[in-house]
Amino acid sequence: MKRLFLLSLFFVILTSFKPNSNSFDTFVAENKGKVILVDFWASWCGPCRQELNKLPKFKRKFEGKGVVYVYISMDIEEDKWKKAIEEEGLSNDTHFLGKSIKESKVLKGQSVRAIPRYMIINKKGELVNADAPRYGKDLAKEIKKYLEE
C-alpha cells in the first residue's frame, strides 16, 4: 500500500507541471486584453529566487485585475528548472525555457544579459517596458499605468 501511495505521489508531481508547449507569441496573443509581466530568472540565481519570495504578496495586489505572469528561465538543465518551479510554488503558472523564445516576434531585439529581469507587455500584446523594476511599489505603479490604458 505504501509503495502504491509513493508511486501515485510521484506520478502527481511529474504530471502537475507542464511547460507551455505553445510559442511565446501564441501565449501573448491568447492573453490580449491583459497586461503580461514577464519574469526572467533561473534556478541557480540567488537574487531571482529572493525576488520570487515577494511574488505572493505582489500578486494579491492585482488579483482579478487582468495581470498575467509568465516566467522565462535561463536554465539549461530542465530537471533543476522543474524542481525550482515546484519549490517556489509556481507550478500553476506559465513557464518557458529561454532557449524556446529565441524566435519570438514580441521580444525581437531583446537580449537578457542579467537576471532577474522583468518586462511588461501591454493589453495590445506590445512590449512596452523591456527593463521594468523588480517586485515592489515601482513595478506596481508601472503595471497600473498599463492596466488603465
Image (cartoon, grey):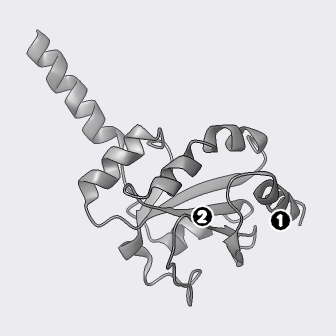
Where does residue 103 sit, x and y in percent of width and height? Answer: 44, 84
Where does residue 61 sit, x and y in percent of width and height? Answer: 78, 41
Position of 5 with respect to 95 (left or right) is left
Q: Residue 38: which numbered mark, if any?
A: 2
Position of 58 with respect to 45 (left or right) is right
Where does residue 130 sit, x and y in percent of width and height? Answer: 66, 77
Residue type, label 2: Val
Q: What element carries label 2?
A: strand
Q: Distance between the residues labelled 2 and 1?
A: 14 Å
Q: Residue at x 36, y 50 (%)?
A: 18
Q: Residue 11: which numbered mark, if any?
A: none
Q: Which of 39 and 13 is in front in this view?
A: 39
Q: In the rendered structure, which disc, 2 or 1, sits on the residue that comes first in sequence?
A: 2
Instruction: Tell me the residue that label 1 is attached to.
Output: 146
Q: What element carries label 1?
A: helix
Q: Is 47 located above or below residue 105 in the figure?
A: above
Whether residues under marks 2 and 1 lie with C-beta atoms below 8 angstroms apart, the answer is no
Where does residue 1 sit, x and y in percent of width and height? Answer: 11, 9
Q: Which residue is drawn at 48% across and 43% down?
A: 90
Q: Is 70 located above or below residue 107 in the figure?
A: above
Position of 88 with respect to 146 (left or right) is left
Q: Residue at x 75, y 67 (%)?
A: 123
Position of 68 with respect to 11 (left or right) is right
Q: Nearer the viewer, residue 3 or 73?
A: 73
Residue type, label 1: Tyr
Q: Residue at x 33, y 49 (%)?
A: 82
Q: Is 2 located above or below residue 51 in the figure?
A: above
